[in-house]
Image: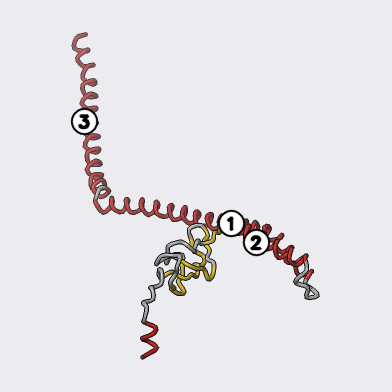
């Protein structure tokens, strides 16, 4: 009787195991259906059109960031240039003040038309010494002319003339000074270019010309 009772007690355990297995199978079926329902969504996200849109959005954000940085850079450079110009102008004006004083002294001595006085001459001399010095300190240079080969980049030929001293193509005289600032020509020098030595006169040509 005891053995029969034990067998009867084992039956509910077997039923519980079966129920658990059926529950697991049902869960797997539900999960499988859920996975199947999610598969189309993953396929949509992986389409070339979706990837292209994502890449375009990324490049758009990068471009906008670079555009903003470049705009800030331009504003900063413009401000730095303004400060540089203001500083350069201030330095030049400060250097020109002594020359302005010299002009004032020279004019003071010429109020009565006395331009031959020692004070007037000294004032003019001081101006002509100080003014070029200020310009040369700013990297201004005179363009070399006489004795140098003619260079159309820095010379402006006004005429050509024979020369006993200089060969053809050499600058023989300077009409107006030229100046350069660094590598930039501010004003070309106006010059006379040599044609070489004049042709020798042939004896008798003048006499024949007179006869004719």
Q: Nearer the viewer, residue 205 or 54?
A: 205
Q: Secondary structure at mark 1?
A: loop
Q: Residue at x 71, y 65 (%)?
A: 124
Q: Nearer the viewer, mark 2 or mark 3?
A: 2
- The quadrant in which residue 127 appears is bottom right
Q: If you read the primary sequence from the N terminus, does the residue marked by circle 2 or circle 3 appear first?
A: 3
Image position, residue 203 (x, y; %): 37, 78
Q: Residue at x 38, y 73 (%)?
A: 200
* Residue extending furthest toward the right: 112
Residue with the mark numbered 3: 22
Q: Using a 10 Å C-alpha cutoff, classify the residue at mark 3 as few (fewer than 14 neighbours), some (14 to 19) or many (20 or more).
A: few
Q: CA distance from mark 1 to mark 2?
A: 11 Å
Residue with the mark numbered 1: 138
Q: Nearer the viewer, mark 1 or mark 3?
A: 1
Q: Secondary structure at mark 2?
A: helix
Image position, residue 99 (x, y; %): 70, 62
Q: Tell me, yes or no, whether the two marked residues, 2 and 3, touch with CB atoms within 8 Å.
A: no
Q: Nearer the viewer, mark 1 or mark 2?
A: 2
Residue with the mark numbered 2: 131
Image position, residue 103 (x, y; %): 72, 66
Q: Nearer the viewer, residue 48 or 199?
A: 199
**Tally of numbered tags:** 3
Q: If you read the primary sequence from the N terminus, does the residue marked by circle 1 or circle 3 appear first?
A: 3
Is 164 displayed left or right of 38 in the figure?
right
Is 52 displayed left or right of 66 in the figure?
left
Q: Tell me, yes or no, whether the two marked residues, 1 and 3, touch with CB atoms within 8 Å.
A: no
Q: Nearer the viewer, residue 55 or 75?
A: 75
Q: Using a 10 Å C-alpha cutoff, classify the residue at mark 1 as few (fewer than 14 neighbours), some (14 to 19) or many (20 or more).
A: few
Q: Tell me, yes or no, whether the two marked residues, 1 and 2, touch with CB atoms within 8 Å.
A: no
């Amino acid at each position: 009787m005891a053995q029969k009772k034990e067998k009867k007690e084992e039956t509910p355990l077997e039923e519980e195991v079966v129920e658990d297995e059926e529950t697991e199978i049902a869960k797997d079926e539900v999960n499988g259906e859920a996975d199947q329902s999610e598969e189309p969504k993953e396929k949509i996200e992986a389409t070339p059109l979706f990837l292209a849109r994502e890449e375009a959005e990324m490049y758009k954000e990068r471009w906008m960031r670079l555009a903003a940085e470049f705009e800030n850079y331009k504003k900063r450079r413009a401000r730095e240039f303004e400060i540089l110009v203001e500083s350069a102008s201030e330095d030049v004006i400060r250097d020109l003040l002594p020359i302005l004083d010299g002009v004032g002294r020279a004019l003071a001595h010429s109020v009565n038309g006395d331009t031959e006085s020692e004070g007037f001459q000294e004032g003019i001399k001081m101006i002509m010494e100080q003014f070029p010095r200020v310009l040369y300190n700013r990297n201004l240079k005179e363009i070399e002319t006489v004795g140098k080969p003619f260079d159309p980049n820095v010379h402006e030929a006004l005429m050509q003339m024979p020369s006993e001293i200089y060969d053809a193509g050499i600058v023989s005289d300077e009409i107006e000074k030229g100046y350069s600032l660094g590598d930039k020509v501010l004003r070309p020098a106006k010059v006379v270019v040599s044609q070489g030595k004049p042709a020798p006169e042939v004896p008798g040509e003048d006499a024949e010309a007179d006869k004719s």
